[in-house]
Image (tube, rainbow, N blue to C red):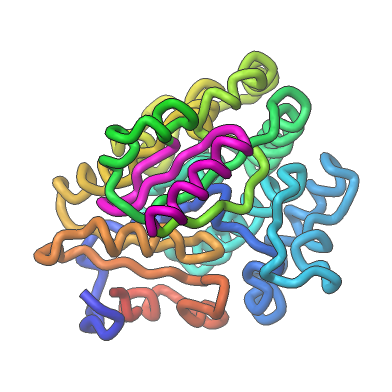
Amino acid sequence: MNNNADILPEFSMPLVFMFSGQGSHHFHMAQNLYQEHEGFRKHLQNLDILALKYLNCSIIEKIYDSNLKKDIPFTDIHFSHPALFSIQCALAKSIMDCGITPDMVLGYSIGEFVASVIAGVLTVESGFFLVCKQAELIERYCPQGAMTAILETPDLYYTLPIFQEKVDLAGINYSRHFVVSGGIRPIEHIGAFCLQNQIDFQDLPVTFAFHSDMMDPAYDEFIRFSSAINFAGPKIRMISGLDGLVTSLVNAYYLWNATRKAVFFNHVIRRLEQQGPNLYLDLGPSGTLATFIKYNLDKCSQSRYCSLINEFSLGMDICTINQRQLKTANFC
């Protein structure tokens, strides 16, 4: 499959909305879209009202701060958590306004909160509140940490003591991409080891060790706050970002596990592919999940994937998107 894939004549496969997690965010994400797309701007401004209520500041001003460049790490979880939630939620709502409804939603880590909103499990306000509350509790109770992606076979994690003794396996995204999470010094040691052994790696723009036991101090308080929220049954099929199974019950424990447990995205996609081909639509700000899909699909797979936005440009012109355009979109 390549970027010049054949034009799809119709929706012949289920449509999957995908929402990414911490690490895919950056300052000025979806800025062109915010400036040019009235529907997206309206939804993001509605979310900004919630930011004023729960954060006492504008999340739009934080994302599009003219004093900060795109390549400056967006590491303040107090704002990055709700910013990532808001961008993806606004994008999904904008597309659904055009009459395009997903057959399935799939969230990765904090993306599960967005998936829960789009599936009708949570209201937009409840989802926003929980994201803000989780960030607050992590800041209050959890020690700072770090995460890094290793562009090599996950066998390294299981066979080399430096990995198992110092850090947790946060996830496996495809055959040569896994993520480790832990304390700042241990992650620095991992980076030094990779440099010494010519192993490609990339530090994630986070200051906490998601998907590791360093999250555990915030568990009790998160469950207590979340248990007071009304969780409805999914109206759209929710695919768990942890195991690829259809989820019928979403509650406080489910959302906690989404950011605490390791994510085996390779297994999730393998399970989805066993059910038949799909159209995977990445609604994250950097095209991260579309890239993961690319490296998980077999050469013989009939599935297609597309990223609507990424950190360099629009992946698809959604300023005028409608049902017919998505049907004829140039999916890879």
In the shown orientation, is residue 314 left or right of residue 44?
left
Classify 3 as above or below 55. below
Residue beneath the point at 67% across and 45% down:
81
The answer to which image quadrant residue 126 occupies is top right
Q: Is residue 55 magenta?
A: no
Of 312 and 332, nearer the camera is 312
Residue 16 at x, y = what percent? 35, 55
The answer to which image quadrant residue 277 occupies is bottom left
Residue 115 at x, y = what percent? 49, 45
Residue 137 at x, y = what percent? 73, 27
Residue beneath the point at 75% across and 32% down:
139
Q: If the image is split into quadrants, where does the N terminus sit?
A: bottom left
Of 322 and 136, nearer the camera is 136
In the shown orientation, is residue 252 left or right of residue 65?
left
In the shown orientation, is residue 178 left or right of residue 76?
left
Classify 102 as above or below 35. above
Of 243 and 173, nearer the camera is 173
Residue 66 at x, y = what percent? 83, 73
Residue beneath the point at 56% across and 63% down:
285
**Which residue is the extreme one toward the left?**
300
Magenta part of the protein: which range?
170-199
Looking at the image, can residue 51 be seen? yes
Classify 153 as above or below 230. below
Looking at the image, can residue 115 be seen? no
Residue beneath the point at 78% across and 61% down:
60
Q: Is residue 179 magenta?
A: yes
Q: If the image is split into quadrants, where does the C terminus sit?
A: bottom left
